[in-house]
Image: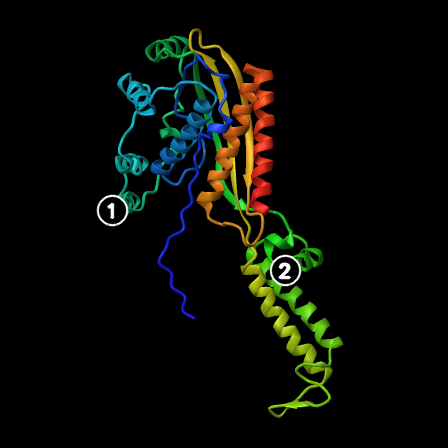
């Protein structure tokens, strides 16, 4: 039997679901401004991409609920033309602090080292202070908000901040997430030694825990490698003590493997969103969301882009749900019920 693979697997996701559209925002227009990014971004470029992903999710949710929005590039152009934000090349921002240091009274040798690091930072994309360069960190007064609203004929101005956008390890010890060996060795290590001060001690503790479990198994087992038929292997006699040593070594090795495996990546996204009246600048609604997303099992998608996509979409979804409920409680309650029923039908069809 021959297996021939010549096709492709296609995954598609329509972000604005026609079945979930509402008229809550009908007749209203919103302008979405860039969010202030206060996270520890690795580069200005990643900060802009992160901001773009947040604004795109917001645009989808507003359009789905009947609001109209201007093209986001037009909003950027308006802000740039009025010097509200300053969009510069990424490479020009990455070495701003180094350029400042080069102007100081350093020795020629020190300036040479700073120049080397400046060139390295430009080539590697290291950012000096991405939070300060975020386009949304500048404040807007009531006059600027009103002029912005008039220019785009908007009812609301949407602003916000990206408070956290980082990765970490999921603290869960669920065996279906960590794997069986990592779970057993890790739990034994934590119970026996507690929280280690450094990774090296934690690895040593995991090896000791694995070795201890292996030695216990070897001590009560007389089947392998030494048994009644094989009392000597390659000229080395053993017995129960030999099994204890061999299984202890195997357990220590598995403990080391378990320490270097069993990672559960987690995406952490925290967003603040505010809605201002475009006529007087008054904040009519604001809220903050903290979302943590990790794979459901060892077989789930571990890619960080998928985790951050899920976390950002969930965060924007919950914030928008809260705002829409304030705007029209009855209609949003019906929309929630409709979405819940649609998700249930989707889950049943997936199980089939």
The image shows residue 193 at horizontal and vertical percentages of 68, 57
Q: Measuring 63% from the left and 70% from the top, which residue is drawn there?
A: 251
Q: Is residue 103 left or right of residue 304?
A: left
Q: Is residue 83 left or right of residue 64?
A: left
Residue 180, label in figure: 2
Q: In this view of the protein, can residue 316 be seen by the observer? A: yes
Mark 2 residue element:
helix
Marks 2 and 1, how far apart at CA: 53 Å
Q: Is residue 152 left or right of residue 210?
A: left
Few, some or many C-alpha atoms within 10 Å of disc 2 (few <14, some 14-19, many ≥20)? some
- Location of residue 83 by image quarter: top left
Foreground of the two, 51 or 102: 51
Residue 94, label in figure: none
- Location of residue 76 by image quarter: top left
Q: Is residue 273 above or below residue 190?
A: above
Mark 1 residue element:
helix
The image shows residue 311 at horizontal and vertical percentages of 51, 37
**Which residue has dot 1 on it?**
112
- Location of residue 141 by image quarter: top left
């Amino acid at each position: 039997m021959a297996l021939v693979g010549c096709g492709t697997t296609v995954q598609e996701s329509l972000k604005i679901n026609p079945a979930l559209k509402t008229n809550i925002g009908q007749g209203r227009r919103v302008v979405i401004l860039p969010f202030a990014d206060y996270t520890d971004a690795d580069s200005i470029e990643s900060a802009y991409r992160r901001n773009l992903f947040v604004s795109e999710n917001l645009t989808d949710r507003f359009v789905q609920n009947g609001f109209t929005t201007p093209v986001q590039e037009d909003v950027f152009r308006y802000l740039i033309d009025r010097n509200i934000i300053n969009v510069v090349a990424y490479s020009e921002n990455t070495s701003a602090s180094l350029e400042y240091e080069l102007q100081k009274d350093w020795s020629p040798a020190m300036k040479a080292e700073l120049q080397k690091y400046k060139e390295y930072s430009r080539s590697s994309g290291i950012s000096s202070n991405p939070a300060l360069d975020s386009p949304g960190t500048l404040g807007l007064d009531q006059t600027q908000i009103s002029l912005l609203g008039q220019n785009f004929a908007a009812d609301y101005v949407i602003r916000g901040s990206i408070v956290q956008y980082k990765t970490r390890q999921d603290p869960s010890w669920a065996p279906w997430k960590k794997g069986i060996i990592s779970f057993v060795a890790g739990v034994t290590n934590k119970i026996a030694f507690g929280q280690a001060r450094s990774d090296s001690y934690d690895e040593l503790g995991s090896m000791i825990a694995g070795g201890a479990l292996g030695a216990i198994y070897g001590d009560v087992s007389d089947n392998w490698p030494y048994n009644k038929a094989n009392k000597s292997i390659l000229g080395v006699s053993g017995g129960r003590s030999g099994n204890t040593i061999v299984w202890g070594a195997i357990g220590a090795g598995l403990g080391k493997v378990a320490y270097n495996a069993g990672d559960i990546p987690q995406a952490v996204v925290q967003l603040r969103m505010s809605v201002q009246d475009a006529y007087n600048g008054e904040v009519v609604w604001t809220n903050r969301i903290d979302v943590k997303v990790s794979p459901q099992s060892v077989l789930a998608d571990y890619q960080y882009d998928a985790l951050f996509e899920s976390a950002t979409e969930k965060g924007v979804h919950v914030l928008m749900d809260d705002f829409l409920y304030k705007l029209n409680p009855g209609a949003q309650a019906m929309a929630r019920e409709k979405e819940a029923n649609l998700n249930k039908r989707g889950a049943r069809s997936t199980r089939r």
